[in-house]
């Protein structure tokens, strides 16, 4: 059977995939780095006044939502979680604007949050697990169709 032009990914779909992968990379890298040295991670979080469960939740969020965005599986939810995480990180940890480094981290977190909010609105695009699931199942509940669209 011959593939028609409408079934092939468009340039916009490829660019959206690239954007998702680039946005998710920082979270996947950081999550795996924190997990790889969990003792040091928990110590660092303790110095910031944060508990071990918060450290573990942060790792789970970064890896889980990072994979969600990268693969396009429930990508809108993953992107929303990471957008809110970036806003919280910026507002809680990077507000010493006297420091150029802190200002840069604040702005970086806001920029990443902006990209994630764009993904929340646009969805993962046609090169995604969400799209594959939508095309494979017509019997899914309406709420799940909404999350995947």
Image (cartoon, grey):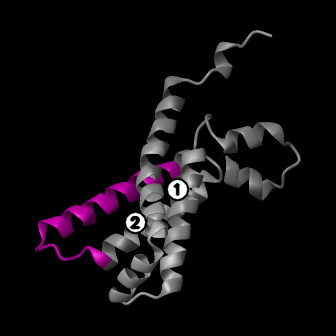
In terms of secondary structure, what is the magenta stretch mainly?
helix
Closer to the camera, 23 or 149?
Answer: 23
Q: Residues within 10 Å of mark 1 (few under 14, many from 20)?
A: many
Task: Quote the CA–CA distance across marks 2 and 1.
Answer: 12 Å
Residue hosting label 2: 86
Q: Is residue 124 visible?
A: yes
Q: Which mark is residue 66?
A: 1
Q: Are marks 2 and 1 in contact (CB under 8 Å)?
A: no
Left or right relative to 77: residue 90: left
Q: Is residue 123 visible?
A: no
Q: Quadrant of residue 130?
A: top right
The x and y percentages for residue 109 are 33, 62
Choose the circle earlier in sequence order: 2 or 1: 1
| SS category of the residue bearing label 1 | helix
The x and y percentages for residue 119 are 50, 49
Counting labels gives 2
Please check the rendered image and state whether residue 74 is part of the magenta-colored stretch, yes or no.
Answer: no
Please check the rendered image and state whether residue 95 is part of the magenta-colored stretch, yes or no.
Answer: yes
- Position of residue 124 relative to residue 120, above or below, is above
The x and y percentages for residue 55 are 48, 78
The x and y percentages for residue 146 are 71, 53
Closer to the camera, 133 or 62?
Answer: 62
Looking at the image, which residue is at 68% across and 43% down? 129
In the image, the segment drawn in magenta is 93-119
């Amino acid at each position: 059977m011959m593939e028609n032009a409408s079934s092939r990914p468009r340039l916009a779909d490829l660019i959206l995939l690239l954007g998702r992968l680039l946005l998710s990379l920082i979270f996947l890298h950081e999550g795996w780095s924190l997990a790889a040295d969990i003792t040091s991670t928990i110590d660092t979080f303790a110095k910031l006044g944060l508990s071990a469960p918060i450290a573990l939740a942060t790792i789970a969020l970064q890896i889980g939502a990072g994979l969600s965005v990268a693969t396009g599986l429930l990508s809108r939810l993953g992107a929303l979680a990471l957008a809110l995480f970036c806003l919280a990180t910026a507002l809680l940890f990077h507000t010493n604007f006297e420091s150029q480094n802190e200002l840069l981290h604040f702005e970086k977190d806001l920029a990443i949050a902006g990209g994630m909010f764009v993904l929340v609105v646009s969805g993962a695009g046609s090169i995604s697990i969400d799209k594959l699931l939508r095309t494979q199942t017509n019997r899914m509940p309406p709420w799940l169709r909404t999350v995947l669209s």
